[in-house]
Structure formats: C-alpha cells, structure tokens
Image: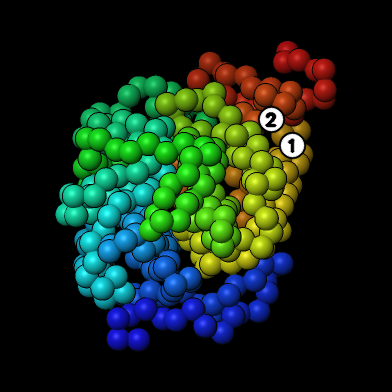
Amino acid sequence: MADGVIPAEMEARPAERGLTYPFAGPPASGEAIAVTPDVLWMRVAMPMQLDHINVYAVRDGDGWAVIDCGLAINGTKDEWELLLAGPMGGAPVTQVICTHMHPDHIGLAGWLCERFDAPLVMTRLEYVMARMLLADTGKEAPESGAVFYRAAGWDEAQIGRYRKEFGRFGMAVSPLPAAYRRIREGDRLTIGGRDWTIVVGEGHSPEHACLWREDDGVVLGGDQILPRISSNVSVWPTEADADPLGDWLVSLERMKTVFPDDVLILPSHGEVFRGVQTRLDALIRGHRVALKRLERSLREPKRAVDVFPALFARPVGDGVRGMATGEAIAHLNYMLLQGAVVRERDADGVDWWRAIKKGEEAA
C-alpha cells in the first residue's frame, strides 16, 4: 500500500513447534503490518546477531501510542522518520510505552518524548534502573565488578575488558525524561478508548510490563514471551546473590494462569504468533532441562565459566561473555537456593560450584 501499511489478510505460515504464525513474514524496513485495524507491527534494525527489534504503534485518538523504540545509534532515527511519515501517516506520538529498560527498548524513548512532547510510560523499577545505569555512563568500573567476574572464572585480560567497557549503557540510550507515568501489575492503561491490562514479569528485567487488550486478545509481550529464543536471565555484579531464574520461572508459571491460549502475542523479537500456553511450557521446560544438565556437569567442582557447555549450544565469545556468565550464575544461584549445589571460594577469589546430595553440606 502507498502508506507502507500491509493489510492483515496476509497468508499465514504453517504451524511450527505448536505455534501458529498469522502472517507470511515480518514487515520490511519502513513498512508496517496492521495486525488489527488499530495496531501496527514495525521493525527497526540492530547491528548484532539479534538483528532487529519489533516496535508497535497503537492508534490513540488522532495519534499513536508507541511501544518500545530501538537503539539510539546511527540509522535508527532515519528508520523512525520513514515509519512516522509512512505507515503512521505523519500523526503525532501521544505516549511512549517501554516494556522494560534494556537499551533496544528504551534507546530512542527520550528522543520521541521530546520531539512530540509525549509522556514516557514505564513501571517504576524499570525507569529507576534505567536512570541508574545512565548515571554510570563514563564512570570507572567499581572494584566489586572485578571481584564478581574473577569469582566467575574470568582471567585478568577479560576483567580488563570489563573495566574498559563499563558505563556504556548510555551510548545507545538517549537521555530519558526527568519524569514518567508509572504503570504496575493489574493497572488498566487506556489507549484510543480501549483498555490494556498490565501483566508484570520478572527475571529478564526487574519489572517487565506486558500489555493485554482483553476485548480482542492482543498481547504486547515485549521480551517476556518470545517465539523462538529464550530471553537472557542473568545475575549482574550489582546484586551478586540474586535469583532471577527463580523469578523468571515463577512469572512464566503465573502467566500460564493469566493468558488464554488463543491470545495473539506481539513479541519484541521474532514474529507475531498464537499458542502462548505451548510456548510458556517450552520456556519452562528448557530451563528445567538445562538445570538437569548443569547438575550432572557439577559432579566435579567447576567455575561459572566452565559450565557454559551445559547451558549453551554454541561457543561463548567475548561479545556475549558477560550475558553468558550472568545466565550461568543465575542457574547456579537458583540451584544453591534449592540446596542442590554448594559454592566455595578459593584463595584466589574464584568460586567453585559442586553438586551435592540432599542434606549434604559443604566441607
């Protein structure tokens, strides 16, 4: 179509792994797919292995509410200019809603809010965490971070890279507004005269918001429910003893009781799909299987970096070492709290993890 909006009557793709995909493929750059008459599915590129983020626009009176924004890097604003002028018809942005605080979701939120004098809408923990990380921009890495990664098994060269790269959150995030509008679990957010219920998940981020329009079963799922990949669930140096995997599994189990299976999931990565109960089951099962593999691998003491093969299907390089380490420690911390492993720190500050039988204690 001339305005770059592809009508919803696209040929559906065949079912895959119990999921169905109502559309033949994702929207092209600068275009949109109308998943309903008032909801646009669009994409902006990212320069990494995960090469896109889905962004959405919901008709809101004479303008659009935007959900998630992409990274604040060269080229992304140009993509937004095409979307604003094309599929969105030059109408203003009325509010910017961010599902959570990761840079690919909030990167251009400040720019869009300032340009259209639109409010930023987020949960409190996500907004505060983003402001905290932006405040770290350009600062030196804290010694506690070096201690954390040394304990995980990083060598001095890898710790040096951590020090060099610390505080780069702000390199892909434009300054956020000094004020925001809070949403929380159970709230109803009205967009274009229709209510969306806020459903909060934890684990991938502290207070991730999904938006569910119950009258037609559309769910803006963010990173909480992705069709083909599992969201990163990590422990970070700021809270070394955290249990995000426990939070994640509880959230997934709870969402099984919240969402009917016929809802239409609009994820942040991958394609729009149906089959939420099947996908939630698969996400839970994937972590349970990984925990069993991890327990078997810990018959002999190992560092966090030594358990990568038990958790990941491909080698871990420098570009993803931080996320892989965080995810490994998330699984180890979960097992520690379940009484399945013990952790012992040696004289060099390195943690060694070992599986134990129920009731056994560390020597």
Q: If the image is split into quadrants, where does the N terminus sit?
A: bottom left
Residue at image mark 2: 335
Q: Provide residue 23's location: percent of width, then percent of height.
A: 54, 77
Quote the CA–CA distance across marks 1 and 2: 8 Å
Q: Provide residue 334's location: percent of width, then percent of height.
A: 65, 31
Q: If the image is split into quadrants, where does the C terminus sit?
A: top right
Q: Residues within 10 Å of mark 2 (few under 14, many from 20)?
A: many
Q: Is residue 79 positioned above or below 149 on the image? A: below
Secondary-structure class at tag 1: helix
Q: How is the image coloured?
A: rainbow
Q: Residue at x 36, y 63 (%)?
A: 59
Q: Are circles 1 and 2 on residues that touch, CB within 8 Å?
A: yes
User: Which mark's residue is nearer the viewer, 1 or 2?
Assistant: 2
Q: Residue at x 30, y 51 (%)?
A: 95
Q: Is residue 161 left or right of residue 349?
A: left
Q: Nearer the viewer, residue 45 or 95?
A: 95
Q: Is residue 78 left or right of residue 187?
A: left
Q: Nearer the viewer, residue 64 or 221?
A: 64
Q: Residues within 10 Å of mark 1 (few under 14, many from 20)?
A: many
Secondary-structure class at tag 2: helix
Q: Count the marks: how many?
A: 2
